[in-house]
Image (spheres, rainbow, N blue to C red):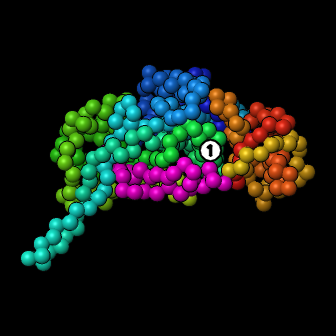
Amino acid sequence: MHVLRPITASDFDALKQIAVESGHGFTSLPVNDALLLEKIERAERSFAKNINQPKDESYLFVLEDSQTGDVVGTTAIEAAVGLNVPLYHYHLGKTVHHSRTLNVYNTVDILSMCNDYTGCSEICTLFLREDSRKGLAGRFLSRSRFLFMAQHSERFADTIIAEMRGVSDEQGHSPFWQWLEEHFFSIEFPQADHLVGLGDKVFISELMPKYPIYANLLSKKAQAVIGKVHEKTKPALKLLEKEGFEHRGYVDLFDAGPTVEAKLGNIRSVRESLVCPISIGELDYVDEQSSDTLAICNQGVSDFRATFTKHAHYNHAKHTLIISNDVAHALKLKQGDAARFFRL
């Protein structure tokens, strides 16, 4: 069984290994001991807070194999981005050059730097180790965040965003960044990427062009990747699109990967999730092939637990969720407690 839970200090070694495996472009997990420890400590403080509105909390989770005790993945939610350190994006818009006299009408794409997502909540840091990328683990790891957000909506903003990894090669070089580097920065993408991961974003405001960039002035390779995702990120983007996330023209400053957004109440997993009392008992019969797989969580914050299983059944007539003893134990639930769930 895979169980999602809040990260703790004892997960440091596992988190560091995940940071190493995640590679270039995964700026939210830098391979830096001090920063990783600070992320864990910040998450522990966030889960412990008693609050009713989002501020600077960071909820970092790990996915644990209950049989082995191994941490096989991680995911996170930032409650309100851009409040302490500015969050920069480019917005892809249009400008028109028109001359009635010359009968000329040209529409040109432009990139304008902005901070439009300040105060929004962000889902981020989604990574599943390669050995566990089978079955429904990846889908659960992505959608399980919405169980927590639905259960504790007062902790999050109305708009939820996700920054998707843009196009880069195996060495971590981005075609979009190469154009910016040549004209404005003189540092390579992996170095800029690393600085952002360390939280050092001062150079962005110092060196980024202050005026809108005409997209047709970029190299053909740079133009081709604006709003496109890394090959390994395509499955994650498809999952979010099924949840109702949309791309509204905002892209990353460095690799031009798209940022997608949705209103919290419109997210499919939030809308479709139900809360009801549980009844603990073994199910008479479980058809592993045709039975629904349910994603289920308890109602806790610091002791939050979530898992996915076929050993659960929703009784519509009694508005009761019947779960096995193993599932109840994994979720720290006892007879009569309430749980939230949706069909995975």
Instruction: Looking at the picture, tell me which residue is in the foreground, 137 or 271.
Output: 271
Q: Is residue 248 left or right of residue 318?
A: left
Residues drawn in magenta: 243-272
**Up-down relation of residue 306 to residue 15 (above or below):** below
> Could you tell me which residue is drawn at 46 percent across and 34 percent down?
29
* Residue name at image x 70 percent, y 36 percent: 299
Q: Residues within 10 Å of mark 1 (few under 14, many from 20)?
A: many
Q: Identify the secondary structure beneath mark 1.
A: helix
Going 47% across and 31% down the picture, which residue do you hit? 56
- Quadrant of the snapshot with the N terminus: top right
Residue at the farthest front position: 52
Residue 253 visible to the viewer? no
| Nearer-the-camera pick, 279 or 275 | 275
Residue 254 counted in the magenta span: yes
> Which quarter of the picture shows residue 105?
bottom left
Pointer 1 residue: 150
User: Is residue 86 toward the left or the right of residue 338 in the image?
Assistant: left
The relative height of residue 37 versus residue 133 in the rendered view (above or below) is: above
Residue 4 at least partly seen = yes
Q: Nearer the viewer, residue 80 or 39?
A: 80
Residue 306 picture location, percent across and down: 68, 39
Query: How far from the left and from the top, in percent, is residue 277?
Result: 80, 43
